[in-house]
Image (spheres, rainbow, N blue to C red):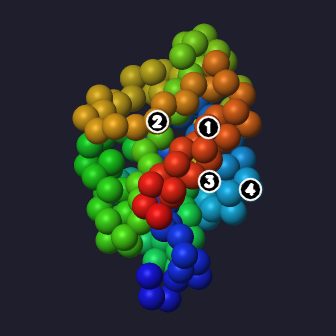
Amino acid sequence: MRGSSYPDRMAILVSLSGLPGVGKTTISKSLSARSKAVHLRVDSVEAALKRSVLNIHAAEDAGYLAIASIAKDNLLLGLDVIADTVNPIEITRELWASTAAAATAQLLNVEVICSDTDVHRQRVEARNSDIEGLVAPDWKSVSKRKFEQWHTGRLIVDTHVSSIKECAETIACEMETLRSSVR
């Protein structure tokens, strides 16, 4: 790949999906540190849009489109990228597929779940936002959130069953399997 920082390997876009409070950001941070991947968090971008002089409160798709563009730039450099988003509907999932394809990168879809509803609720209710201007959603809004059924393959990691470290290791192993399949 011309211009790539790592010309001997295929870049991978890891698209993390899941409801708020399941552990996506914690896994993203662990995986990023482990694999030296770029971590892109849509919440950070959406909060920045709200704080900007444009005062964009209903970010709609702007945050997703912004991090998809940044993801593509980094993938073209040969860097692995972790997109940390809820990714609840087919159109957002297609965005990551087209982003990976545009950068001639591999796509790894990962759905992060917490299979114990009580534990998930406790996590949501105990959360404090670590991003200026971002209000963490409450349990009522999380439990009523639209999350469409998947129609494509994905890796599922369960943060109730596995530790954050184990989830990150599972994803890292899947990244290596993907990478070795294109060599």
- The reply to whether the C-beta atoms of the residues labelled 4 and 3 are less than 8 Å apart is no
Assign a secondary structure to mark 1: helix
**Position of 166 compared to 18: left or right?**
right
**Position of 175 compared to 106: left or right?**
right
| Discs 4/2, front | 2
Identified by mark 1, the residue type is Thr
Residue tagged 1: 170
| Discs 4/1, front | 1
Q: Position of residue 92 (x, y in %)?
A: 32, 50
The answer for how far apart the CA atoms under marks 1 and 2 are is 9 Å
Residue at x-position 60% and y-position 44%: 173
Residue tagged 3: 133
Q: Position of residue 23 (x, y in %)?
A: 62, 35
| Nearest to the observer: residue 183 or residue 34 | 183
Assign a secondary structure to mark 3: loop
Residue tagged 4: 33
Identified by mark 3, the residue type is Gly
Residue tagged 2: 155
The answer for how far apart the CA atoms under marks 3 and 2 are is 32 Å
Residue 1 seen in this snapshot = yes
Identified by mark 4, the residue type is Ala
Q: Position of residue 119 (x, y in %)?
A: 64, 15
Q: Determine the image quadrant of residue 106.
A: bottom left
Q: Sort mark 2 into few (<14), some (14-19) or many (20+) by Cα contacts within 10 Å.
A: few
Q: Is residue 54 above or below residue 170?
A: below
- The reply to whether the C-beta atoms of the residues labelled 1 and 2 are less than 8 Å apart is yes
- The reply to whether the C-beta atoms of the residues labelled 4 and 1 are less than 8 Å apart is no
Q: Determine the image quadrant of residue 37.
A: bottom right
